[in-house]
Structures are given as structure tokens and as C-alpha cells.
Image: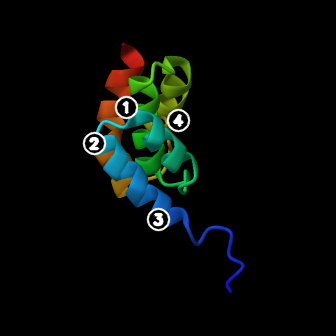
Amino acid sequence: GENNASKMEPYHELFGLVALRQKNYKLAVSEFRQADLTQLHNKFQLAQALEATNAKDEAQKLYKEVALNNFNTIDFALLRSEALKKTAS
């Protein structure tokens, strides 16, 4: 009965992660698109899934967004170097 539009985002994040680990990249893309993409780890994992489905241009755009994020968060600290490597290739 709750009308919170974002209440299912954690569900989609989890299912996206499971699909990514199972190498079901199309499903992972679909799930991560419904997750909270303000969270850098979700954006990074969406980029990984997109890269695996050969949507390399969109993946590169997301990797750049992660690499250039200007906030001191744990996500940024953990993902920045990997995202920078992806943008260099």
C-alpha cells in the first residue's frame, strides 16, 4: 500500500548483482536500470553489464561518471581506479 516509487530499488540492485555474477548480462542491465543509480556501485555494475552486452559507448559514459565523481564516498574510493582504467582503454 506504500506509494514510494523507489521502494523496489534495493530489490533490483540485488537481482542485478545476482544476474551479473551469473553472467546473465541482459537481465543485469534491466535490473540495474531500475536500481538507484545515484549509488556509484550500481552505476559501475550497470557499466560492467553494458560492456558485456557490447553497449560499450554507454558503458564508457558511465565509467567516466564514476571516475569523475567528486564526492568522498566509500564507493568512489573503491571504484575510482578501476573506472579510470576502463576509461583509458
| Residue position for label 2 | 22
Point out the tag, 2 or 1, that comes first from the N-terminus: 2
Dot 1 amino acid type: Ala
In the rendered structure, the answer to whether residue 82 lies left or right of residue 72 reads left
Q: Do the numbered discs 2 and 1 sit on residues whose CB atoms are within 8 Å? A: no
| Residue position for label 4 | 65
| Residue position for label 1 | 83
Say which residue appears at 48% left-offset and 54% top-offset.
39
Label 3: few (<14), some or many (≥20) within 10 Å?
A: some
Q: Residue furthest right?
A: 3
Label 2: few (<14), some or many (≥20) within 10 Å?
A: few
Q: How far, Cα to Cα, is label 4 from label 3?
A: 23 Å
Instruction: Determine whether the residue tagged by mark 3 lies in a helix, strand or loop.
Output: helix
Q: Which mark is residue 64?
A: none
Label 4: few (<14), some or many (≥20) within 10 Å?
A: some
Q: Position of residue 47 (x, y in %)?
A: 45, 34
| Residue position for label 3 | 11
Q: How far, Cα to Cα, is label 3 from label 2?
A: 17 Å
Q: How far, Cα to Cα, is label 2 from label 1?
A: 22 Å
Q: Do the numbered discs 4 and 1 sit on residues whose CB atoms are within 8 Å? A: no
Instruction: Determine whether the residue tagged by mark 1 lies in a helix, strand or loop.
Output: helix
* Above or below, 73 relative to 11: above
Q: Which label lies toward us, 2 or 1?
A: 2
Say which residue appears at 37% left-offset and 27% top-offset.
84
